[in-house]
Image (cartoon, coloured by chain):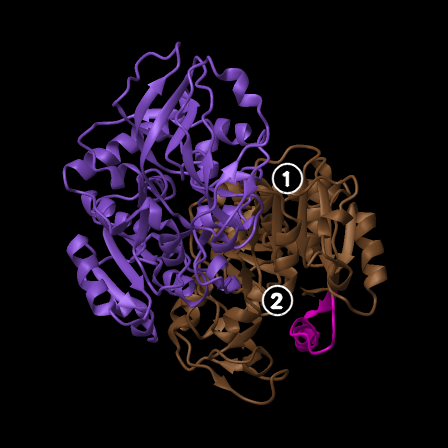
Chain colours: A purple, B brown
Amino acid sequence: MAAACVRLMTLKPIIHGTSSSTFLRPTSLKFRAYSTALMSPPSTAIFYQDHGPPDTVTKVVEMPPVEIKANDVCVKMLAAPINPSDINRIQGVYPVRPPVPAVGGYEGVGEVHSVGSAVNGLSPGDLVMASPPSPGTWQTHVVKDKSLWHIIDKGTPVEYAATVTINPLTALRMIEDYVDLKSGDAIVQNGATSMVGQCVIQLAKLRGIHTINIIRDRTGSDEAKEKLTKLGADEVYTESQLDVKNVKSLLGNVPEPALGFNCVGGNAASLVLKFLRQGGTMVTYGGMSKKPITVSTTAFIFKELSLKGFWLQKWISSDKTDECRKMTDYLLGLIREGKLKYDMELTPFNEFHTALDKSLGKLGSQPKQVIKF
Amino acid sequence: MAAACVRLMTLKPIIHGTSSSTFLRPTSLKFRAYSTALMSPPSTAIFYQDHGPPDTVTKVVEMPPVEIKANDVCVKMLAAPINPSDINRIQGVYPVRPPVPAVGGYEGVGEVHSVGSAVNGLSPGDLVMASPPSPGTWQTHVVKDKSLWHIIDKGTPVEYAATVTINPLTALRMIEDYVDLKSGDAIVQNGATSMVGQCVIQLAKLRGIHTINIIRDRTGSDEAKEKLTKLGADEVYTESQLDVKNVKSLLGNVPEPALGFNCVGGNAASLVLKFLRQGGTMVTYGGMSKKPITVSTTAFIFKELSLKGFWLQKWISSDKTDECRKMTDYLLGLIREGKLKYDMELTPFNEFHTALDKSLGKLGSQPKQVIKF
C-alpha cells in the first residue's frame, strides 16, 4: 500500500527556502540505475520530514522520477482532499500512519499516465482512485501497484471521486452496520454540517429514515439549518435550542431514534444520548470538541444504551477491498444521479497552504478543502 | 407476578405507633367473604404506604389472612435479602416497581405451607424460591400463583437460596452474554468485594478465566484482598494503587482483558476501561459512587471499546423463566458443592430495621443483609 513512501525512504532530501517554495533534491543516486527503465515524471509533492504542526512541517518538494515496475501504475493526480485524519497523521497523533519522511494525503483521484509492462485493464486516460485509500496522494504523480487503483466512470466529478471513500463511506457503514433500521425509523446525529453529517441525512432519506440533526450555535446557523433541511433533514437544532428539560418533546412526528452518531463529544454527545430511545446505540466516529463523553450508569443499565466507535481505516484494513469498492461505486452512482452531494471548496495545488490553514480552522468555519492539481 | 400486592390494594391500612411496632388493620371487610375458603395464616410484613426514605416509610405490619385460590401456593418464608434494588423500589427511583402500597423485597426462599386445590407437584414442606423474583418477599407468609414458585433441593442453605437469583445470576449472565471468552482470557472488574464481584471471580475461575479486581481504598483493604485472592482472584488492586501511568504494566502474566464489569462509575469505571484490550467491552450493572462514566472519543474510535449495560430484571422479563430456573439450579449446585460462596450476614426478622440501616450504609461497610424469618 505504501509503495511511493517506501521509495521516499531512499531519499535524503535537501530542503531550501520557505514552505511554499521549498524543493527537495535527492542525494542518493539509486534511481539513476533505473534510467533505461520506464520512469514516472517528476512529482511535486506535499512532503514532511518529521511529525509536527502541519503548517510548519509540510513543504512543497520536487520528487525525482521513480521507476514504474511491471505491476505499477503511474497516475497523474486530479484531486485530493484534506481530511482531519490527514492532519492527525502529519501531527503524529493518528494511531496508524506512514513512517516519516512521507508525502501527505490518503484519498485521491487521478488519470492513468502510464502503466507497467504487466498491467492489464488499466490504460492511460482512465479515471482511477486510490481504493482503499493509501498514503501519499498529495502530489502530482503517484506510482503504486495496480491493485491499489480502482477504475471509475469518467463522468464522475473529480472532487467527489476524490472524497467519496472516507466520509461518505463512513456515513454509509454507520447507517448499515450497527442497528437494523427500517423505513420510518430515525437517526440522531451531532456535527450534522460535516461531510459525514450531510451524507447521513441523504443516505438515511433514501432509506426512508428520519434524521434529527444537531449543529453548533454560531453565526450562520439559520443558513446551515436551511441547507440541511434542503438535503432532507427532518429536524435541525442548535445545541442551545436543546437546553430543555425533555428533548424528546421536540420530536413531533419523528419516532425516538434507535441510532445516534457522535463526532463531537462533550455536551453534543450527551444530546445525542438524550434523544436515543430505550436500547439505542450511539456510534462515535470523531471528537471535534476534544471533550470526552459523559454517561450516567443508569443510562447503561435502565435505558440499556450501547456506545460504540467506528473507525473506517480499521474497517477497510480487515481485507474489505472488494466491499469497499462496491460501496464506493454505489455512492458514486448516487452522486452522478444527483442524489448525494456535499459542500466542498476546490483550491488549486499551488495554494495548498491556504487550503491547509482553512482545514486547520485558522480561517474560521470552512467547507471541506479539496486540492485540485 | 404481583398477586400478593394486588390483594393489598383492597386494604386501607390504619397505621399506629413507631416503625418497629406498627400494625396495619384492614378497614375493608372483603376478605370475610372468603372465610369458608382455604386461607393463609396472617402474615407479618415490611410494608410501605408511599415511596420515600426506606428507614422512614417501611413499617412492620400484620397482614390479614388471604384466600389461597385453586392455583395458589402459600409459602412460609425462611429467608430474604435486602438488595440495593429493593431500597430503590421503596425510594420510588427504580424504573420498575410495584404500585404502592406494597410489601418490600423481591428475592426469597421458603417452605410450602399449604397449596390450592389445583396445585400438583408442590406439597407442604417443599423448599421453594420466588423464581424469577417477584415483589413482596419481606413477610412471613406469601401467597402467589404456583407458577411463581420454583422447587429446589432441600439440602440448599437457605441464605444462598434466598440470594442466588439476583447477584450470582447477574455475574453468570455477564460472563456468558457479552464476549465469547475462552479459558486463559481475562476479565477486569471494579466493586470486586460486592456479591456479584465475588461470584464473578469464582465463576470465571471455574472457566479458566483470569480476573483483575479493583476495590476501594479503605480500612481493611488488605483483608479484602486476601479474601478475594482466596476465592480465586488473580490480581486485586485498590484504586490508588492504579494511579500509575500505564496500568497494563501491572498485568504480569495475565492477558489484557476483553471484558470489564463496572458497578461503581467515576474513576473506578475509568480504571476498568484502561485495563481493557483493543476492542474490549465494559458492561455496567451498578453505579455505587453515583458518579457518571467518562470516556474519550478516541477510546471508542481507535481503541474500539464498546460500553453496554446489564439489567437482570429486564433480562428476566423477556420471558426467560425456564432459563432463569436452569441457571439458578446450576448456581445452587455449585453452592452445594462448595464451589461458589459469598459473604452474607443473617439477621432475624424482628431486627429488620437494623439490617435495613446496615444496607443503607448507615453503619459503615457491611456484608449483604439477609433476613431470616
Segment colored magenta: B346-366
In 3D space, how far apart are the residues under numbered discs 1 and 2 (Cα atoms)?
28 Å
Q: Within the image, what quadrant is residue B1 found in?
A: bottom left
The amino acid beneath tag 2 is Met
Q: Residue at x 74, y 58 (%)?
A: B244
Q: Is residue A19 magenta?
A: no
| Front: mark 1 or 2 | 2
Q: Within the image, what quadrant is residue A305 found in?
A: bottom left
Residue that badge 2 annotates: B288
Q: Quadrant of the C terminus of chain B?
A: bottom right
Image location of residue B21, percent across then percent down? 62, 84
Chain containing the residue with disc 2:
B
Task: Give the residue furthest to the front.
Answer: A17
What crowding class fits label 2: few (fewer than 14 Cα within 10 Å), some (14-19), or many (20 or more)?
some
Task: Please indicate whether residue A230 sits to the left or right of residue A246 in the image.
Answer: left
Q: Nearer the viewer, residue A244 or A27?
A: A27
In this view, B60 is above or below B241: below
Secondary structure of residue under mark 2: loop
Task: Please indicate whether residue A254 sits to the left or right of residue B296 in the image.
Answer: left
Numbered tag placed on residue B330 in the rendering:
1
Numbered tag placed on residue A76 in the rendering:
none
Q: Nearer the viewer, residue B26 or A323?
A: A323
Task: Give the residue furthest to the bottom.
Answer: B17
Asked if one can make out residue B41 in the rendered structure from this viewpoint, the answer is: no
